[in-house]
Image: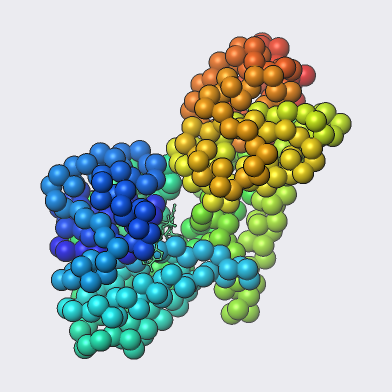
Amino acid sequence: MNIAVIGTGYVGLVTGLCLAQVGHYVTCIDIDTNKIDQLQKGHSPIYEEGLDKLLRENRQQKRIEFTTDYDMGLADKQMILLAVGTPQKNDGSADLGALFSACRAIAEHLSTDVIVVTKSTVPIGTNERIQDYIKQHAVNNNAVSVVSVPEFLRQGSAVQDTFHGDRIVIGGENTEAVETVAEVYQPFNIPIIKTDLRSAEMIKYASNAFLAAKISFINEVANLCERAGANIDDVSRGVGMDKRIGNHFLKAGTGYGGSCFPKDLSAIIAYGRKVEQPLSILECVQRVNEKQMDILAGKVSKRFRGLKGITIAVLGLSFKPNTDDMRNAPSIPLIQKLIENGANINAFDPAATETAKTLLSDKVFYYETIDGALKGADCSIIITDWKEIIDYPIKLFKKHLARPIIFDGRNCFSLKIMKENGMEYYSIGRPAIF
Ligand code: NAD
């Protein structure tokens, strides 16, 4: 099928390339000329495992192209995917400005009957608005059917998730359009759930809200473990082995971040308020997460009796490993707090340094190696559990740091190894080693 994807970010680029890989002809459209320039030259503007290979192969096979030109991009497409961002507004609700500007472009370039597939995460009722909006602004009478296919990929394993996801949700009011979308996704061989538009929208928000709730829950239990002298690693394992609970998303840490959980939680909470059905559990989930982001700064401050003048090697800046994405990364408020209180920051991240430079204080010093960041620092804080950081020899922490002290926000190391290596070690929900 000839498919256009509007918005060539994490979701749009990965989806476009994966659809091309299973044989469709895909045109990715974006208003960001820099992004499209890079892609036209064969360079991916984002880091995702397996993406470069897909880009190379599908450019060679001429199954993918990139443009900023809606005329060219939307011509003769039977299906148009919407994958633009839906960021958070000040009141917590979703900003649908980019989405409706893309819808306007679709309406103005309509030249054939199309199915519009919404991949962006949108509040309940938005797909109905999209349907009405395009119809209202359409330049001709071509049929438009809107179908919701919410996205569940995780950054860091986006390509793998697209080919091996748990389910594909297809929501729509037009059965024929739903069946056509199901056929497009059939080569992925993933279970498909067909439903109505509003239920599809709700599935996406409920899924993210539940996962965020699991994280805040286990973080609260971890904080309790510290008071109780229990070990959250064992507690999580013991709890997660119950099949009714499951062992995913039970890893204690410094809180969730990223481009989805914080904004999607805010959006569903705002929607709940709007329809007078407040979501009190989710409001607590948010509050617990915000508090959790402060925990490491508090531990460092307590240990050093203040932060003024100490140098801290911060390892990991992206909101999770295997991505360069810094959106709502816990490293941002943490580093800000440390700097505000007089600490000096040496930072290392395998992929996110360039993005971090645009977001963090210009007082941060960046290093290309872990060795460099650690040298002479008073302690190290681990924020993101990149493999490079987990695999870094403890002996080298000891060698390079001025004092052998680690504050580990992701429980990367076993207490036994830390003890054996004579480290002073503070983690989340586990006894301190000193
Ligand atoms: P992103 O910011 O990486 O990409 C969005 C792209 O849309 C950008 O390249 C931007 O330039 C482009 N754009 C904006 N307005 C445009 C317009 N009018 N025409 C063409 N292009 C336009 O965003 P993302 O992370 O890919 O997220 C996209 C959507 O998918 C969001 O609603 C998000 O909540 C949802 N989602 C994201 C993830 C994720 O892990 N990133 C997972 C599931 C769902």
Q: In which quarter of the image is the N terminus?
A: bottom left
Residue beneath the point at 58% across and 51% down: 328
Q: Give the percent coordinates (x, y) of residue 291.
A: 72, 49
The correct choice, above or below, for 419 with respect to 390 in the image is above
Residue 31 visible to the viewer = yes
- Residue 182, quarter of picture: bottom left
Q: Give the percent coordinates (x, y) of residue 306.
A: 84, 34
Q: Give the percent coordinates (x, y) of residue 211.
A: 53, 52
Q: Give the percent coordinates (x, y) of residue 24.
A: 17, 57
Pick the front one: 418 or 179 = 418
- Residue 276 placement, left or right of 4: right
Residue 218 visible to the viewer = no
Pick the front one: 204 or 157 = 157
Pick the front one: 358 or 431 = 358
Q: In which quarter of the image is the C terminus?
A: top right
- Residue 11 placement, left or right of 296: left
Residue beneath the point at 56% across and 47% down: 358
- Residue 417 placement, left or right of 167: right
Residue beneath the point at 65% across and 19% down: 375
- Residue 280, quarter of picture: bottom right
- Residue 406 placement, left or right of 350: right
The correct choice, above or below, for 263 with respect to 358 in the image is below
Residue beneath the point at 77% across and 29% down: 310
Residue extending furthest right?
305
